[in-house]
Amino acid sequence: MRRRLLVATVGLVAGALLVAGLGTLLLIRRSARDEARRELVRQSDAISSQATVANLAVLRRAMRLEGAVAVTVGPGGGVRGQLPNNVLESDIDVGAVRQGRVTSGSRGNLVFAVAPIQRQRALLAVVLTRKVGGGQSRAGAYLLLTGAASLAAAALVAGWLARRISRPLIDAEIATRRIAAGDLGARVPVPDGTDPEVASLAHSINTMAAGLARAQGLEQQFLMSVSHDLRTPLTSIRGFAEAITDGTATDPARAARVISSESRRLERLVGDLLDLAKLDARRFSFDVRPIDVCEVIADTAAGFEQAAGEAGVTLAVDVPRHAVVASADPDRLAQVVANLVENALKFASTRIDVTATPVGDDVVIAVADDGPGIPEDDLPHVFERLYQSDRSPARQLGSGLGLAIVAELVDAMGGRVEAGPAPGGGTRLAVELNGSSSSSA
C-alpha cells in the first residue's frame, strides 16, 4: 500500500508538472513570437518610410537587423530575388505590398515581416526575418530543473504521507488477524498525532476486541455455571439412586423425593436452555392480545407462596382491584413473572413485593427484594444471558438463566426491562408493557 500511495502521488505531481510545463512553454513560445512580430513590424514601418535600395545596407547596419533581403515584385505578382530561408513566395502578400502596407507572419520558429520601399521602375519589398527559440530553450531548462526539484519534494512528502497513512492500517491489519486467530488481547496502538479517522478506526477495533474478550470470559463463566448446575443434581440423583439400589438408603422415601426434586431442577435447566435456543431461532410462538396483568400476576405469585414460606420470605402482591390491561401473551407473561419472582427468592432476606402500576398508556410490573442489592456498574448487565453477578445468592433456585429469558420474552412482546435499586434497599426489576385503552372496573 505504501508503494502504491508513493507511486500514485509522485505520478500525479509529475503529470501536473508535465501539463503545466508544456502549457508554459507554449505560452512562452507564443509570447516570444508575438513580441518578435511586433518588433519586426516596427522595424518594417521605419524601413518602409526611409529605405531606398541605395541606403538599405546602411539602415541594416544602423538598425542591427539580423536579416533584411530586398526582393522585386513583378507586374504580374511574381516575386524575383533570393528570399530568406524558410520564407516562401506564397508568404509575400503582393496586394498589401502594392498598397504600401507592412505585413507579417511566421513559419515554425521563424518570424518575418514584409515592408514596401520607395519605387523606382519596379515595386520593391524588404523581407525581415528573425528566429525565435533561444529564450524557449532557457525556459525549458529552467522548467526541467524546477520540475525535478518539485518531483523530489513530492517524493519526500508522498513517502511521509504514505508512512503516516499506511502504518496505522498495517497495525490494524495485524491486530485484526491476531484477533481472528483467537488472541483477544491484541490491540491497535494509537500514537499521539494520529489522524482522527484512523484513530477512530483503531478505537473501534480495540472496542470490538474488548467486547469479544468480555463475551468470551462471560461465556466461559456461563459454561462453568451450567456445568456445575448440571453436575450437582446429577451427583445427587446418582448417589441416592445407587443407595436405593444397594439397599443402603436409610430413608428410601426421602431419597426418592430428592431424586424427584433434582430431576425437576435438571428439567428446568434444560427447558431454559431450549427456550433461549428457540428465542434465538425466532421459533417461539406469541399470542399478544389485551389481557388483565393483575390476574396473571396473582395466579403466578400464588404458585410461589409455599417456596417463599419455606424460605422465611414474605411474598406480597400489590395490584389494583380493577383490571389493568396490557398487550401481552398471557402464558409468556406468566413465565416472565415467575422468573422474576424466582430470581428475587434467591436473594431476598425477608420480603418480596410484586406490583403492577399503570404509567400513562403503559403498565409497569415490578418485583423488588430486600436482599444485598446489585452494584451500580452491574445493573446494565443483569439481563444478559452470559452475565454472572459477583453477589452470592442466599438460596439456589432455578437455572440462572431466568433474567435472560425475561429480557428476550419482553422484547418479543414489544416491551422493555430495567434493573435498579429497591426503595428500601435490595433490587427492583421492572417490566414495562404497552398498555391498552380497554380496561374494566
Image: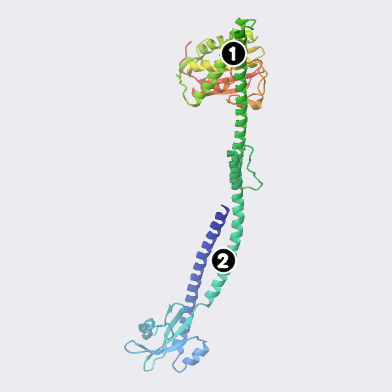
State whether residue 68 appears in this view.
yes
Image vertical order of residue 205 relative to residue 127, above or below:
above
- Dot 2, how many residues are within 10 Å of its Cα: few (below 14), some (14-19), or many (20+)? some
Number of callouts: 2
Cβ–Cβ below 8 Å for labels 2 and 1?
A: no
State whether residue 357 appears in this view.
no
Whole-percent x, y for residue 341 in the image = 58, 15
User: What amino acid type is highlighted by mark number 1?
Assistant: Glu
Q: CA distance from mark 2 to mark 1?
A: 87 Å
Whole-percent x, y for residue 89 in the image = 37, 84
Residue at the disc numbered 1: 262
Which residue occupies the foreground of this view, 71 or 150? 150
Residue at the front extreme of this rendering: 246
Q: Specify which label sits upstream in the sequence, 2 or 1.
A: 2
Whole-percent x, y for residue 228 in the image = 62, 21
Q: How is the image coloured?
A: rainbow
The quadrant in which residue 78 appears is bottom left
- Dot 1, how many residues are within 10 Å of its Cα: few (below 14), some (14-19), or many (20+)? some
- Residue 346 is left or right of residue 115, and the answer is right
Under circle 2, the secondary element is: helix
Which residue occupies the foreground of this view, 31 or 159? 159
User: What amino acid type is highlighted by mark number 2?
Assistant: Gly
Residue at the disc numbered 2: 147
Going 51% across and 13% down the picture, which residue do you hit?
A: 296
Which residue occupies the foreground of this view, 126 or 267? 267
The quadrant in which residue 44 appears is bottom left
Residue at the left extreme of this rendering: 76
